[in-house]
Amino acid sequence: MALVNIDSVLRSLLQKLAKLNAPQGIELLSYKRNRSIAVLLLADGKILVRERGYRDGEQVIEKEALPKFLKSTIKYEFPRSRKVRMYQLNNPEETEKVRKKL
């Protein structure tokens, strides 16, 4: 877990995602841990993005469309945040894990 500056979170996420394998992913959480964006790698080379917060939903997108999609999603879910929490997920079930709220 790391607190990452919102300006560099997209670059950090893409770098970490490139090093992961298919069932793994990255989860971004607000400082208070009440909103999240989970980016999970799928076996067919596509990416699953789960939003929990202002919007709740899932979308499967192509790798090429990920930076543009995440940029708008991060602005929507974390509008006034300066720092976000970044967790590495080893399997999709970890997104359902209850995290301590501040």
Image (cartoon, helix red, strand yellow):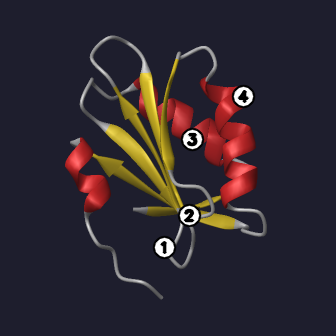
Residue at which label 1 appears: 33
Mark 3 surroundings within 10 Å by alpha-carbon count, few (fewer than 14), some (14 through 19), many (20 or more): few
Q: Nearer the viewer, mark 2 or mark 4?
A: 2
Q: Decide which of 92, 16 is in the foreground and name it.
A: 92
Dot 4 or dot 3: first in sequence order is: 3
Q: Quick one: SS at disc 4?
A: helix
- Residue at 42% across, 17% down: 46
> Residue 55: image x %, image y %?
60, 56
- Residue at 64% across, 19% down: 65
Mark 2 surroundings within 10 Å by alpha-carbon count, few (fewer than 14), some (14 through 19), many (20 or more): some
* Disc number placed over residue 12 in the picture, else none: 3
Residue at which label 4 appears: 68
Q: Nearer the viewer, mark 1 or mark 3?
A: 1
Q: Quick one: SS at disc 2?
A: loop
User: Taking 20 as reference, is 92 above or below it?
Assistant: below
Dot 3 or dot 2: first in sequence order is: 3
